[in-house]
Structures are given as C-alpha cells and as structure tokens.
Amino acid sequence: MLLQRGQTLVAHGMRAACVVEDPLGEGAQAEVYLARIGALQFALKWYRPEYSASDPRRWERLKQAISNGAPTENYLWPFDLVSMPRASSYGGYLMPLKPPGYVGFYDLMKGKTEPTFRALVNSGFQLADSFLKLHAHGFCYYDINFGNIFFDPDTGDVRIADTDNVDINGRIGGIQGTHGFMAPEVARCEVPPNSASDRFSLAVLLFHIFMVGHPLYGRRQDELPYDAADPDGTRRLCKDEPVFIFDPGDVSNRPIPGFHDCVVRFWNIYPQSLRELFTRAFTKGLRDPESRVMENEWRRELRILQDSIFICPTPGCETQNFFDVDRARNKQALNSCWACNRPVPYPPRMRIGTHNDSKLVVLSPGTQLFPHHLENDTYNFKAPLAEVITNTIGLKNLSHQTWSCKLQDGSTIDVPPQGVLRFESNCRLHFGKVDAEVKL
C-alpha cells in the first residue's frame, strides 16, 4: 500500500491533520482510503508517484474544481488537497464518502441487484441533470462510464466519482475516456473529449441502465474475424464501423436471439418516445455530434417516464409497467404486462396544468407529486406534496395547503393537509397554482 493506517498527512485548505484509516479501493492511478480529520470521515484519493509525470495538469484541475465547487450534490467532488508533512508537492485529495448502501452499476449489469423501474428512472434523471449542470459551468467530465458511478438500488439516487478528470470543455486532458463509451470521433483521435462526446457517453450509459446491454454490440460482434489487436471487437464496433443494434435503416447488427434476449426484452418494455431518443443518439448521433440527445431532452423524457409507471392489476403480479402516451393518443390498447403477459387496461391518471403545458401522471401505488407537478417549480423533487394511498385508492395531501375538488355531480369538497381525496372519475382538483382532472 502507498499509505499506512494511522499515518498523518496535511489537508492544506483546512489546515488540519488528516489521519489515514482503512483502504477502500485501488486503481491503476491511485489508491483510495478512509481518512479522518477530527471526528469527521472522508475519502482520500492518493496518487501513485509514477503517474504524476503523465498528467502534469492534475493539480491545476483539482484546484480549479475545489474553487468552483460541485455542480450538484450528486458528485463526490474534491474539496481539499493533501500532502505529506513538510512535503513540497501534493499527493492526493479529499472528497465526500460514498453513502452506505450505494453500489456500482456493474452490479446491475451482472444481475447482483434488481432495482425497480422507479429507481432506475430516477438514476437516469439524476445523471442527465448532473451532467447538464456540469456542462453549464463550462466543464467536461471526459470519462463517463458505469465504473465510476454508484447508486442506491432502493431510491436510484446516484453519486459520481473520479471527478479529478473534470476539465474545461474541449481542453486536452489526462484521459480520453473508456473504450466502449467514448464517442467515435474521440476514439479516432479526431477531437479531444468535449461536452458533445460526454453526451454520447451519457447515452451509452443510459442504454446500459435501461436495456442492460451495449447499443453497438449485436450480430456483427459475432461475425468479426479475430484480431489480436482488438480481441473483443470494441475498436471496430465502437470506433471504426459503429452500427446501432436497433438502427431502423441498417439491420446488419441486430441482437442475436438467445444471446441478446435481455436487451430485446427491455427495448420492448419502454414507451416509443424513449426508444426514439436512443435511436437518434445512436444513428444521427454516431455521425454528427450536433445531433446528439441533449441532457435536457433526457431529463424531460425521464420525468415523463417516471410519471407513467403503473402496477399491473393482475392478482399476484403487481409488476411495474409503463403507460405509453403515444399508444393512448392513437386509441390503441396498451402492451400486455411484460411479466405475466396479460392485457392491462388504461390505469387511473391525472392531467395536471393547461393543455399546452400539462403533465400526465398515472395514479398508481407509489406515485408521488412534487413541486415540479403542483407548483410550476420545474424539476423540484425535494419533498412530495401528495401521494397515492393504496388502501383507499386516493390521494393524500402532504402539503401545507388545502385543496379544493369539484366532483362530477357539481359539488365541491376541501382536502386539508393530511387529508385524503378518494378518486372519482372526471373530478377536478385545484392545488393552488395548478388545476388537474382525474380519469379513472
């Protein structure tokens, strides 16, 4: 190990002694330790000396990151530089610890954890939101992949690590990215990593999260002749000749039955609108960085997706499904439940707001309404203002305001804080800032 338990280092910004505790992990560039300053514990990333010369701008980047602060709380962001006592150079940096219970997305890929769709959609939203805010500050992440991101399987909340590679957008840095996630133009060394290549890597990451597979690994992976310089075909599939496995205009790389069944199954579970975003990301977006799906597009789609989750009503099934708005607009039946394969009726739902700026929310056990829905405070999900109650099939008022509801017979009732409104078809609710109509 590079450091020993009980060893004392110096945290420069805090001007405090930093005591090394247990090792947490290691990589090619550094080791990570649990560290203590007084009674507080943090994560300490300590670099291997041999890598210092290969990345001469590392400390400049870290100082800039510390000065700017984290774009969101989802980042395990550097907050202080650390050195040996009386040393003339830094050796590592401090960052917050990963919260207890968080696991890597490798666990999802390997089937070691099975989060709900609600959790996965929340993960996707937080990733898109976090990278949007990073890019808005003029920075690029450089190395988006599921090896440096952790999530809570119960809630989907994410934490993004390895932020020492973050740099000013478009600047040549110490890393290009991870094979299989890099944008083709970056892998071909045509341009340095930038916000547009980050968007490609984000799309690959989201595809992994929702489809549990790679968007460019299909039949062509099996057909490639062996190349010792590219044994798994990643270079040819992702850099030289990339083809989306569901490209509507090119069937040469379709999933192989019996080998890619998981990807095919999940592809058919999600609504058409999400599939269209992935199709653009890996067709036009493969060739034209300006055509890639923007972070805000992912945010919007994933919030709609979260609001469309409902529970299969078949007794004993209770599997989460998605209400496909496009099928509803075309007056088509919903797809059968993906778990029990039984037909599902249109679920109870609520249309919130005006027609041009409305939100459709499926009223299913576990559904919550936030300031995002009821107070025109876009993407504010900090505290729920309402929740669907299963035992009364109603909506509980978690806000501090009294709602009013006009029933189908024309009468009006009030719903005070902590009160529950029993759903009735075509009733209209006034939440204070927005109105809504219920359809059962």
Image (cartoon, rainbow, N blue to C red):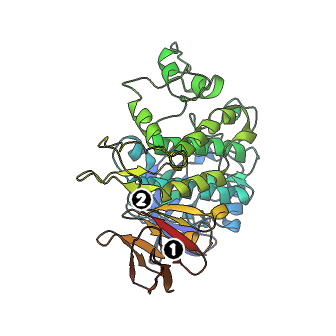
Q: In front: 252, or 50? A: 252
**Front position among marks 2 and 1:** 1
Seen at 43% across and 45% down, the residue is 334
Name the residue tied to disc 1: 428
**Residue at disc 2, secondary structure:** loop
**Looking at the image, residue 294 lies above or below residue 79:** above
Tell me, for residue 399, which label it has, or none: none
Crowd tier of the residue under label 1, counting other residues whose Cα lies within 10 Å: few below 14, some 14–19, many 20 or above: many
**Alpha carbon of mark 2 to alpha carbon of mark 1: how far?**
36 Å
Seen at 59% across and 40% down, the residue is 276
**Looking at the image, residue 323 lies above or below residue 335:** below
Could you tell me if residue 29 is visible in this image?
A: no
Crowd tier of the residue under label 2, counting other residues whose Cα lies within 10 Å: few below 14, some 14–19, many 20 or above: many
Verify CB contact (< 8 Å) between mark 2 and mark 1.
no
Give the percent coordinates (x, y) of residue 79: 61, 67
Could you tell me if residue 392 is visible in this image?
A: yes
Farthest residue to the left: give it.
316
Give the percent coordinates (x, y) of residue 266: 43, 39
**Residue at disc 1, secondary structure:** strand
Give the percent coordinates (x, y) of residue 439: 46, 63
Q: In front: 133, or 140? A: 133
Farthest residue to the front: give it.
409
- Amino acid at dot 1: Arg
Q: In front: 152, or 163? A: 152
Instruction: Kindly indicate the quadrant of the structure image that contains residue 257.
Output: top left
Considering the image in quadrants, where does the C terminus appear?
bottom left
Give the percent coordinates (x, y) of residue 132: 66, 56
Seen at 68% across and 49% down, the residue is 294
Seen at 61% across and 78% down, the residue is 433
Name the residue tied to disc 2: 152
- Amino acid at dot 2: Asp
Q: In front: 398, or 12? A: 398
